[in-house]
Amino acid sequence: MSSQRAITVAILAMGGEGGGVLADWLVDLAEQSGYFAQTTSVPGVAQRTGATIYYIEMFPEVGVPQGARPVMALSPVPGEVDVVIASELMEAGRAMQRGLVTAERTTFIASTHRVYSMTERTAMGDGRVDSTKLLDGGRAAAKHFISADFAQLAEDTGSLIGPALYGALAATGRLPFSRGQFEDTVRRGGVGVNASLKAFAAGFAVALKGLEPQLTLAPAAAPVGASSVGPRLAALAQRIRDHFPAAAHETLCAGIVRMADYQDLAYAGEYLDRLAPLGAMLPAGSPLSASLLDDTARHLALWMSYEDTVRVADLKTRRTRFQRVGGEVHLKDSQHLDIHEFLHPRVEEIADTLPAGLGRWLLASRWARACVQPFTRQGCVVRTSSIRGYLLLYGIAALRGLRRRSLRFQREHQRMDDWLATIMRLAPTHPELALEVARSQRLVKGYGDTHARGWRSYQRVMAMLPRLQAAPQGAQQLKALSQAALADDTGQALERMLATV
């Protein structure tokens, strides 16, 4: 029996990232260098609910008796993996969760970019996993941890992420092969050799220098400040500097930019008008007061830019959207891009877009609803890349000038005023509870069924406010109720929590 053991490598990669090619390169590298090698793959449920795990084992031929072959495993065993490569940060977390990364043995290579999972995307609240915690966990779990935005390196070199990760692996020295042997494997592949070698070199250099990870999905934008809102909003930015505390300037400037983009300059001024009384009544220098104003400003900006049919049509017909989609699919000059939008407006959303009186009449009139409902039973597909489809949505977006007269506008602004009045009533005597009331706005979002469910949850939570105001732990209980409302879209978690208050 030989005392030697196999070299084990696990690769966690999503579809289209070249994980299979990377595994094949490692097998070819090993076999060309006097090793037995085997690769297997265990596919995930879907592209983003679980990545494919490619597992490679290598065993030196000199350690095997004549006429015999080593028996190799078909899947990685926790605690027995020498190298783990994760093509995305969430996959790095899954590798640690599976026990594949150990401090005594594993060299861990992870890309720090994020492709959000389905559970993160569909969460009713902010379901994103903290990238910093994942990186800290990687450093603690591995013997050697190498992290960088390898996806950006691949983008910069016109290649896939696989060759960049392959270069990082070569730089670690964890495998008994030279850089030249790694590169020869790429050349033998014969497909996209030049681009792959560029990405390989970039990954090799980053791993060799031990660069710190880039935590953002895309290059970080400059923070919005009072000096960066543009000349049209300069007067409002000056008003922010003169009448609001510095701790809230960044949020307020982002708010006026959003309001002007959503409606117009006057709307941005109304945003500040609504916040001015709260800013004037809060004591200066208090961290709690600063948090209350900042959170109220942020959630008010989100509420005042509520999603309606006009907003959706506006966003879908913007030039920047076509540019973004073209960039995501790597559109070439010789290619044509078609974008198909699935739309399913309900009678309620049509009524919300109409002038208030007409919208109420449509909702109250049985025969009017009966006339409109046949056109709303099934959704429709609109091709915004065609002239007809684009003009249809562009015409809906052009109704922005009539938004102030719409039924939805009146309803939402009445609700905002009630919410702000509650915050101002509680701020002097129950500032912590007022802060949780401000944050409870996150329950109200979206449009259609999503908005209706969120508003019902918000009403149920706010109905408990008189009782919570008299409770010593009222703020904590309100926070727990909001979290329960965001836990599921059935309302069962909220029902259970309400029974305990």
Image (cartoon, grey):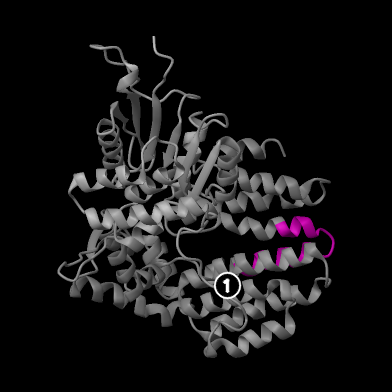
- Left or right: where does residue 395 sit relative to residue 429? left
Q: Name the chief secondary structure element in magenta.
A: helix
Q: Is residue 413 visible?
A: yes
Q: Is residue 486 visible?
A: no
Q: Position of residue 159 (x, y in %)?
A: 29, 56
Give the residues drawn in magenta, as a range. 416-435
Q: Residue 330 sits in which quadrant?
A: bottom left
The N terminus sits in image quarter = top left
Q: Is residue 173 magenta?
A: no
Q: Which residue is mark 1?
A: 223
Q: Position of residue 190 (x, y in %)?
A: 17, 48
- Left or right: where does residue 338 sit relative to residue 224? left
User: Camera-side residue: 32 or 138?
Assistant: 32
Relative to 496, residue 354 above or below: below
Total numbered labels: 1
Q: Position of residue 287 (x, y in %)?
A: 79, 64
User: Camera-side residue: 403 or 356?
Assistant: 403
Q: Is residue 434 magenta?
A: yes
Secondary element at tag 1: loop
Residue at x-position 42% and y-position 57%: 448
The single residue placed furthest to the left in the displayed view is 334
- Which residue type carries mark 1? Pro
Q: Position of residue 339 (x, y in %)?
A: 24, 63
Q: Residue 381 sits in which quadrant?
A: bottom left
Dot 1, how many residues are within 10 Å of its Cα: few (below 14), some (14-19), or many (20+)?
few
Residue at x-position 61% and y-position 90%: 235
The C terminus sits in image quarter = top right
- Left or right: where does residue 132 sit relative to residue 387? right
